[in-house]
Amino acid sequence: LHGCETFLLYDDDGQIIPAHSVSAGLDYPGVGPEHSHLKDTGRARYVTVEDHDALKAFQQLSVLEGIIPAFESAHAISYLDRLAQETREAGEMKTVVLCLSGRGDKDVHQAEGLLTEMLDDEDVR
């Protein structure tokens, strides 16, 4: 966007670093000005989640609850486990609301292929 300041993934030379994610909506190297503002004002905290962790969360929610999440939501579900552990270790209790967006049925075939590849590296069951 011309004329706005935002956060980008870039290297030491200022060159844009390509982003990759199994989720098409999460593979862009920048964020919009709204998210930049929310981060700067402390109203939002942004974290990273590896694709393999999101795929595990995708599988876990599908098996345990019968809900097939979209890949974008699977990333949030994966982070929820990390947040719960951090909260327990700090001796805190928090109420967290997680909204599932989209539908995961569109991602099932891609997830099947990716989870099959992961089985070669580790046990995801």
Image (tube, grey):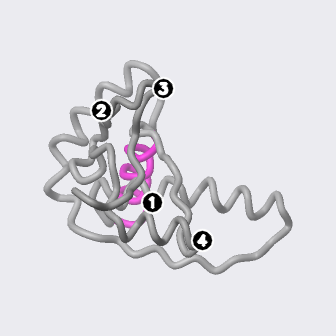
The answer to whether the residues at label 4 and label 2 have Cβ atoms under 8 Å apart is no
Tell me the CA gap for discs 3 and 2. Answer: 14 Å
What percent of the width, then of the height, locates residue 80?
Answer: 55, 61
Residue occupied by mark 3: 12
Question: Residue at coordinates 18% horizontally, 40% vertically from top-left?
Answer: 110
Which mark is on residue 76?
1
Where residue 18 is drawn, which disc sits there? 2
Asked if residue 63 lies in the magenta stretch, the reply is yes
State which tag comes first along the sequence, 2 or 1: 2
Find disc 4 in the rendering and name its residue. Answer: 42
Q: Amino acid at mark 3?
A: Asp
* Vertical relation: 101 (above or below) 29: below
Disc 3 or 4, which lies upstream in sequence? 3
Q: Earlier in the sequence, mark 3 or mark 2?
A: 3
Identified by mark 2, the residue type is Pro
Amino acid type, residue under disc 4 in the picture: Gly
Q: Which residues are magenta?
A: 53-66
Q: CA distance from mark 3 to mark 1?
A: 29 Å
Q: Amino acid at mark 1?
A: Ala
First along the sequence among labels 4 and 2 = 2
Q: What x and y, as percent, mark residue 87?
A: 74, 64
Front-most of residues 51 and 20: 20
Under tag 4, what secondary structure?
loop
**Residue 7, how many percent across, how many down?**
42, 52
The crowd level at tag 2 (other Cα within 10 Å; few <14, some 14-19, many 20+) is few
Foreground residue, 78 or 26? 26
Q: CA distance from mark 2 to mark 1?
A: 21 Å
Quadrant of the image for the N terminus?
bottom left
